[in-house]
Image (spheres, rainbow, N blue to C red):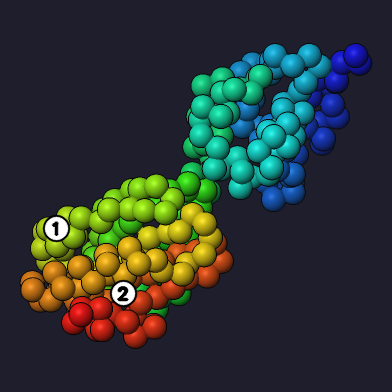
Amino acid sequence: MIESRRIKSWPKKERPREKLLSTGAERLTDAELLAILVRVGQGTFKSSVLGENATDLGRRLLRVFHGLPGLDRAHVEDLLRLPGIGPAKAAQIKAALELGKRLCAGKLTAAAFESSASIADHFRPLFAGKRQEIVTAVFLNGQNQQLGQKEIAEGIPTQVTVYTRRVIEEALRLSAAAVVLVHNHPSGSPEPSAGDDDTTRDLARACRLVQLVLLDHVIVGASDHYSYSDEGRLGALATE
């Protein structure tokens, strides 16, 4: 087997770290960016795969997990099964991916949630890569400005139990005037299930009892979303 050249032997302009510093991160390939991550904290990169340098390892990660989306969905345990990936490297990779998602969500955050689309856009990066449903409540004041948000429940991909009391208690603690319920569908389709209807109905009824407005229940899919408010179903469910 012919041993790959060590990155230190490459021309400086071709080395991932030097290339990033001189031309900007956006000019690097996914594999080159991963190469920088897996070399952090090490004087010399060492892989258990003979002849493999950090860029080779980056390419292998992308190949095994089918690109960055698959790498994001992978559990830390999945990463640790790969030769050359230890706890430090796995933690660095997952941390970098999480920072990227939070940055995307931050760019989409507005002072006020004025539409179901803005809510879906805010949460989609945060839900990306999740294998199960995550239910989050967003609490708003009278001007529809966000007071806070809280993860209410987490479940398997096709079922989640939402505790209405948790939503009401948090809304009262924040003195919220309104609430929006948001959750993802790992399948990618935002079409509501019978369970989603039940959740919306129960929460709408509870909100009416404490004079809290349920503005919407938004289901976030891979590229689109479903809004109970936009579909005109909130009032009907609350009075059933």
Residue 147 image offset from top left, x and y in percent: 23, 64
Q: CA distance from mark 2 to mark 1?
A: 17 Å
- Say which mark, if any, is on residue 216: 2
Q: Nearer the viewer, residue 79 or 234?
A: 234
**Which of the image's four quarters has the N terminus?**
top right
Q: Residue at x 39, y 83 (%)?
A: 231
Q: Tell me if residue 206 comes above or below residue 38 in the rendering.
A: below
- Say which mark, if any, is on residue 37: none
Residue type, label 2: Asp
Q: Nearer the viewer, residue 125 or 234?
A: 234
Q: Secondary structure at mark 2?
A: strand
Residue 47 image offset from top left, x and y in percent: 70, 17
Q: Relative to residue 185, is residue 168 drawn left or right?
A: left
Q: Tell me if residue 79 comes above or below residue 33 in the rendering.
A: above
Q: Pointer 2 and pointer 1: residues touching (CB < 8 Å)?
A: no
Residue type, label 1: Arg
Q: Residues within 10 Å of mark 2 (few under 14, many from 20)?
A: many
Q: Earlier in the sequence, mark 2 or mark 1?
A: 1
- Say which mark, if any, is on residue 165: 1
Q: Relative to residue 137, is residue 175 drawn left or right?
A: left
Q: Tell me if residue 90 comes above or below residue 111 in the rendering.
A: above
Q: Tell me if residue 118 comes above or below residue 40 in the rendering.
A: below
User: How many discs mark residues in the rendered view?
Assistant: 2
Residue 58 image offset from top left, x and y in percent: 70, 33
Q: Residue at x 46, y 69 (%)?
A: 191
Which of the 4 image quadrants contains residue 233? bottom left
**Which of the image's four quarters has the C terminus?**
bottom left
Which of the 4 image quadrants contains residue 29? top right
Q: Secondary structure at mark 1?
A: helix
